[in-house]
Amino acid sequence: MTTRGFPEGFAWGVATSAYQIEGSTAADGRGTSIWDTFAHTPGRVLNGENGDVANDHYTRYAEDVALMASLGVGAYRFSLSWPRIMPGGTVNQGGLDFYRRLADTLLEAGITPYATLYHWDLPQELEDAGGWPARDTAYRFADYAAVVREALGDRVKHWFTVNEPWCSAFLGYASGDHAPGLRSPELAVRAAHHLLLAHGLAAPVLREGDGLAGAAPNLYAVSPASDSELDLDAARRIDGLQNRFFLDALLRGSYPEDVVRDLAPFGFEDVVQAGDMELIGGPIDFLGVNYYSRHTVSAESDGGVVATSPFASASPWPGASHVSFVHGGRPVTDMGWEVDPGGLHEILTRVAKEYPSVPLYITENGAAYVDTVVDGEIDDHERLSYIEAHLAACHDAIADGVPLKGYFAWSFMDNFEWGWGYGKRFGLVHVDYETQKRTPKSSARWYGQISRQNGLP
Ligand SMILES: N=[N+]=NCCCCNC(=O)[C@@H]1[C@H]2[C@H](O)[C@@H](O)[C@H](O)[C@@H](CO)[C@@H]12
């Protein structure tokens, strides 16, 4: 019974990424990625875990697609492994064949494929040549996009260029929490621009013919801890670095002046070259929004950071290291992230109101909670409630005029949670890593029902 229906054709999906689920990291010509290197570096990932096997999705993809179909979801957002497709800069048909098989299996099951080209697994040889701080990497990404478009464009029509460029740039090159694990704000600001330039160069390639493309930034609602001038400025800085830097560039083709000013001490002025912003702000068919939580910030001096790995990190906030993240008094998930569905409504209505109109997808939303298996069943009511509350916020946003076209739950199944390894479970489907057994949690069955009826009770 649906009392809160969603628009006809709304895409109900689940999402994953290559390094987090595929495994088979040396199969069929795959090259090394920066996450292979990072995860195999002692002290970088909790318990020394890595993606060598992960969910063994590379060999079990048909089983996983059948499970998706049985649940009733209609769309699947996955990522392509750049080092599987272009190891050493050369086209690897063995890697492309896997994604041809995966796309064909999805289409046969009536599931629409949405492919992300970059979900953090940069080929190691490109990192060795300078990584995202090096401008040339953006041009290598455009070459990769052309190969992908040519090989898979007959099967895949929906493309996301880069996933969460904020994470790749600031967790990868400033805090060191993510691969390649560097701690240089100067490199991070260069990486942020070149990830957006990569998007700007690749989007026109992916949009040729009947291709549709966008990017998938991670956006947060941001609140000051108080209405003091210092806290208001702290919130401005974090909102600028986290949200407006990416939204302004992608949707207006310019960077916010206050953020450019805050980043000037790190050499940001020298990174942007003539023509870059026209490319970055070029036409897209939709924008993905990854939303998880709200930041509540105060102007403390401890440079507090919402941890993304269990190891000590530097600040991922160049120009705002004096900021501290405070608890807003809301329930938190197993990641320590506050549950705030109102923040999703806030972000969606803000993008719709303040930026040029563009169709939106929720490309990631979900929650990690500790799951307990009882008699082979997992009753993950907290995760189900989290998703239900955020879907209600989506429904309200649509009613308020937001052109929201779909929602992808993060994640289809438990997977490798970056610096935390396998201990943080986001999946609608439970994975027993000893046996690779998949078990739908109560949230999976519930979400499949919502998908089939295209609405909430
Ligand atoms: N300071 N600080 N900040 C902490 C912010 C970390 C933000 N992490 C994400 O948004 C990642 C996104 C990713 O696409 C997916 O691959 C991850 O599995 C999920 C769950 O973690 C989310």
Image (tube, grey):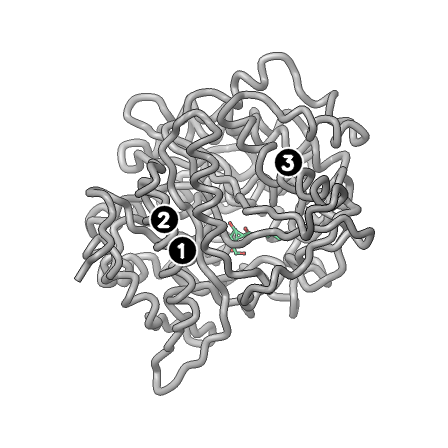
Quadrant holding the C terminus:
bottom left
Q: Amino acid at mark 2?
A: Cys
In primary-sequence order, the first of circles 2 and 3 is 3
Tag 2's secondary structure?
helix
Residue bearing mark 1: 390
Q: Residue at x 25, y 48 (%)?
A: 6
Q: Are marks 2 and 3 in contact (CB under 8 Å)?
A: no
Residue designated by label 3:
240
- The residue carrying pointer 1 sits among few (fewer than 14), some (14 to 19) or many (20 or more) residues within 10 Å by Cα, namely many
Contact flag, marks 1 and 2 (Cβ < 8 Å): yes
Which of the two residues, 245 or 146, is positioned nearer the viewer here?
245
| Mark 1 vs 3, N-terminal side | 3
State the CA–CA distance, disc 1 to disc 2. 6 Å
Q: Secondary structure at mark 3?
A: helix
Instruction: Identify the image quadrant of residue 229.
Output: top right
Query: Badge 2 is on which residue?
Result: 394
Label 1 to label 3, Cα distance in Å?
24 Å
Q: Quadrant of residue 210?
A: top left
Q: Position of residue 421 (x, y in %)?
A: 58, 64
Secondary structure under badge 1? Answer: helix
Instruction: Please state which of residues 396 and 255 is positioned toward the viewer in this rendering.
Output: 396
Q: Residue type at mark 3: give it.
A: Gly
| Residue 50 coordinates in the image, percent (x, y) | 58, 61
